[in-house]
Amino acid sequence: MPGLAPGIKINLQSMIYHVKSQLKLFLPAILKSYAQVFFSNNILFGTLLLLVSFFDFYAGLYGLVAVILTNITALLMGYNELKINSGSYAYNSLLVGLGIGLNFVPGWPSFLIVVFAAILTLIFTVILDGFLGKYGLPFLSLPFLWVIWIVILSSRELSALGLSQRDIYTLNKIYELGGQYLVNIYQWFQGFDFPIFLKTYFLSLGAIFFQYNILAGILIALGLLYHSRIAFLLSFLGFSVAFFFYQFLGVDMTQYAYSSIGFNYILTAIAIGGYFLIPNKFSFLWVIILLPIVVLISISATQILMYFQLPVYSLPFNLVVLSFLYFIKLRAKQSVPLQEVIVQLNSPEKNLYYYLQAKLRFKWLSFFPVYLPFLGKWTVSQAENGAYTHQGDWQYAWDFVMCDRNTLQYQGQGDYVQDYYCYGKPVVAPSDGTVVEIIDTVEDNPIGDANLLQNWGNSIVIKHLDQLYSQVSHLKKGSIKVKKGDPVKKGDVLAVCGNSGRSPYPHLHFQLQATPYIGSPTISYPISHYIKYNNSPEKPFELYSYDKPKLNETVSNMSTTPLLAKAFKFIPGQKIKYVFNGEKNEWEVQTNYLNQTYIHCKATNSYAYLFNDGQVFYFLSFYGDKTSALYHFYLALYQVPLGYYEHMQIEDTYQPNLIFDKKQMFVHDFIAPFFSLHRASFNFKFKAIDDELIPGKISMQSVVKLYTFNKLINQKKFQIDITTNGIEKITGPSFDWQIIKS
């Protein structure tokens, strides 16, 4: 740009870049607005729906204008860009534009109505989003309903708005859109002798986009099948239940008035069966229960609204879905069989697979981390529901002792408390908290005696959260190092093990409780991460996460290895330069608005989300190119304990849709709500360490195994080297990844 000052050049370039970046986001937002009508964010599906909407040119044009205008207005008004880009703000305006374009004569009057109606729809959308969002409810298509009814009612006084008669000249419209070839296709579909059930199903699908012809319905059905097999199955189920219920009532659903509102049954089934609820046999059962209710509301609403000469449109769908979602939110117990979607992935399959994986891997996310209250290896001498004192209100507790190789708790004859290995050993805080209660005045018992009057002996209670307290008991008198009100950190030494209270031999009592008193009733609560020791050279160690030690098990907290902890500490802003199969590239560690950490590969537009709780590193999910280095990195390091224990093995499961290809998942998706056809497992073990005290290199191995009908069909092995440089090298089948040393 000759003749311009450097500052002006920079400003123009930045403006051009900003405009280009906004346009890149804007086009997907338009297409997602179409897909959102079916609770999808699939751009290809949205593209198909956009094309279908132009079966009536003016309906399609007005719908597109409404979407563009709504998104621009929302952007200029400063509303949430994530919602704009997802299409959430504009799909109601799309429906309004389609309705106006189809029902009224094209021209400036109807065009202006679309403009103002789109703005009004956005206003209602934002208001309903704020109001219903407080209750965790969606606004669905209520804004469309309100605005299209306003337009229809007001049009009776607007003489410039004439009702459209274009449906009389359907073939002319088709010819204008695609010539004689498209006319021939349309006539073939219209003339084809479809079973009345299928014909009405396709007409109902087409009616969602104000297209009352079979071809539109077939194309939408194919797009729905491409987007989601579960959604397609639910659409068929919902329509079938409604169709046969109409027959049972003696009403002919094939009449135009009924088939034009048939989409209510399809959208209700998808919403309840697989979008807002995790798809399973119970959500499908509720679809079957609710659809007759939708039918009854459709029939009754038609009778009421005919007095105002208003169409029913999507009123039954909105009433039933919103009522049912609010109904299940008021349950006293959130039952597992009917589970709401917490992380919405805009696909029934993804919602299901993510939920099943999270249920297996992260059922503990709701638990505050609590660890074992000691150092080193201890053995469970009495577990939950124990034979002696862990019964009734105090059944959820553990007693721990220390044993030698011969499983003896003491040396010599064991006549004195000092003979017991656990006596005098440190007792530590199981997690961060505040000391709320202490007893430190009870003498130790001689071996074999028990102080039944001062049952708990010397004890400490720590508050971790409201309704979560820990208690350690039978401590040595005078050994307590904290006082009431002191804050403590996980691992801080509190006292030493003694033999006070109801304790015939030295041991440590540990329990979790909901109230701050010594001797409070216990609650069932897991230990966060701990190591179990086995007398097996093949499997000497096992890692348990958010589980409960059993009787006679020898356990300890997991000791982290600094080399591993450093290697798997990914810090936002960190750049990872590497060579993958001979080609250099770079990743960056980032966080999103939910404070979730992920690794981003700009070259392949791939994302790998991760989580590190200081004890174990996890990859959570992956989005992007499955041929990329980041995908293999995700596979190889799916779960890694941050403490080295030789030959310790870890087993985990992947989401099947992230491992198996689309062809393999096609049939599986149909049956996934009921049972799993495919399974993908992760197996990990430590191989070697060069120096246990000050390690400089650790070797590990992970294996990805693919099963169909529980038969192993494929596997991939990865060798991983950890050094002072971090994760230095990963090799596998056709995979060679190595970090570039800084």
Image (cartoon, helix red, strand yellow):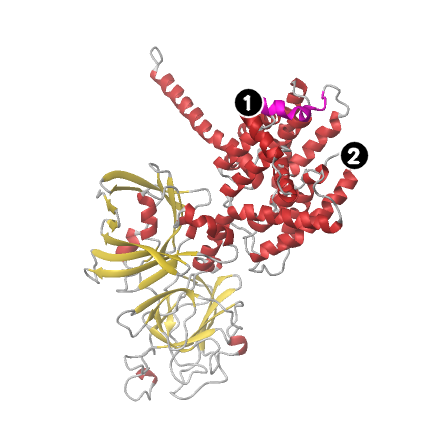
Horizontally, is 121 left or right of 408 in the view?
Answer: right
Q: Is residue 310 magenta?
A: no
Q: Are marks 2 and 1 in contact (CB under 8 Å)?
A: no
Instruction: State the residue at coordinates (27%, 87%).
Output: 412
Residue 570, can we see it?
no
Instruction: State the residue at coordinates (65%, 21%).
Output: 106
Q: Residues within 10 Å of mark 1 (few under 14, many from 20)?
A: few
x, y (%) of residue 164?
A: 69, 24
Sequence-wise, which precedes: disc 2 or disc 1?
Answer: 1
Q: Which residue is mark 2?
A: 308
x, y (%) of residue 597?
A: 39, 46
Magenta segment: 161-176
Q: Residues within 10 Å of mark 2 (few under 14, many from 20)?
A: few
Horizontally, is 492 left or right of 367 in the view?
Answer: left
Q: Kindly state the secondary structure of the residue where label 2 is placed.
A: helix
Which of the two residues, 639 or 468, is positioned nearer the viewer here? 639
Q: Quadrant of the C terminus?
A: top left
Which numbered marker is on residue 494? Answer: none
Residue 419, can we see it?
yes
Indicate the amino acid at tag 1: Gly
Q: Which residue is mark 1?
A: 179
Q: Kindly state the secondary structure of the residue where label 1 is placed.
A: helix
Indicate the amino acid at tag 2: Phe
State whether residue 374 is above or below residue 600: below
Which of the two residues, 585 or 522, is positioned nearer the viewer here? 585
Which of the two residues, 631 or 706, is positioned nearer the viewer here? 706
x, y (%) of residue 495?
A: 38, 72
Q: Give the number of callouts.
A: 2
